[in-house]
Amino acid sequence: MTVDRTGATTVAGVTVPDSFEIARLDPAERAEAIATTARAFWPDPLFGFFCRDAVQEHRALPSFFRSLIDDATRHGEVWVARTPGRCVATASWVPPGGMPRDGRREARIYAGAIGTLVTGRNRRLALRLLSEVERHHPREPHWYLALVGVDPRWQGRGLGRAVIEPVLARCDADGHPAYLETQKPENLAFYARFAFTVRDEVRLPGAPPVWLLWREPQAS
């Protein structure tokens, strides 16, 4: 990361307003990062399908995202955008060799969602959908973008790009592909800007679709 003299921050060639800093997650801002990511996702078609109502969805998102962010912190890296006193965007990555998760890591992830899956709706179909998405996860080495979210108040300022570009630049330099899943169709155009293409689509009757996106390393 470099800071130029015109009052803007440049991260992997992306210029961010000078009121923001792009850096790895500081453990002290973990709670803020979880809350920010949950705000970015709400409302969400997949969690709306799992949950009984909007209140349960609003409560479930932080619990599940805590597990994913903690996993990326332990086994990968989490990048954030900061404005003074606030964490306003996050990107959680797992590096090559970090997926699939072993049984202990998977248990931690599902522990964050078990309350929703047990007390929510569409329980059997929800579990089938999650299992099918996991079954399609690529086995070849890649960087996995597990989560990315920008607080709604700060969207539209290039922060989503800024927090994912550091790892994408490393993918290109090291020759590694990248992979992610999304349940929001409007995200497909966003990720296409970074050369992600739809590799597959998981559709179960009665459940929301999940798109699986792949990105080959790009020539500089």
Image: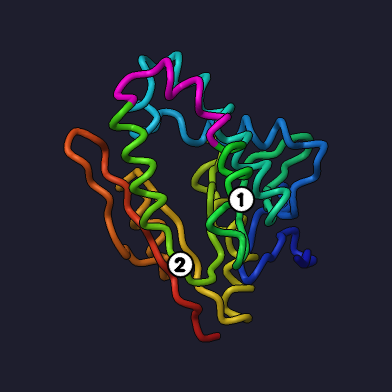
Q: Which residue is at a point 62% across and 46% down the rendered structure image?
A: 90
Residue 197 screen position, x and y as percent: 35, 67
Residue 149: in magenta span: no
Q: What is the three-letter code of the residue carrying label 2? A: Phe
Q: Which mark is residue 194?
A: 2
Q: Please provide the residue range marked out in magenta.
A: 110-123
Residue 109 screen position, x and y as percent: 57, 38
Q: Quadrant of residue 168?
A: bottom right
Disc 1 vs disc 2: Cβ atoms closer than 8 Å? no
Front in this rendered view, residue 91 or 96: 96
Q: Is residue 161 above or below residue 52?
A: below
Q: What is the three-letter code of the residue carrying label 1? A: Ser
In the picture, the quarter occupied by the N terminus is bottom right
In the picture, the quarter occupied by the C terminus is bottom right
Q: Which mark is residue 92?
A: 1
* Marks 1, 2: nearer the viewer: 1
Q: Is residue 98 above or below residue 72?
A: below
Residue 215 screen position, x and y as percent: 44, 70
Q: Is residue 179 left or right of residue 174?
A: left
Q: Quadrant of residue 46?
A: top left
Q: Secondary structure at mark 1?
A: strand
Q: Which residue is at a point 58% across and 46% down the rendered structure image?
A: 103
Q: Which residue is at a point 53% across and 68% down the rendered structure image?
A: 142
Residue reaching furthest to the bottom: 219
Q: Is residue 208 left or right of residue 47?
A: left
Front in this rendered view, residue 182 or 204: 204
Real-space CA distance between mark 1 and mark 2, rounded to the nearest whole angstrom: 16 Å
Residue 124 screen position, x and y as percent: 31, 28
Q: Which residue is at a point 80% across and 41% down the rendered structure image?
A: 27
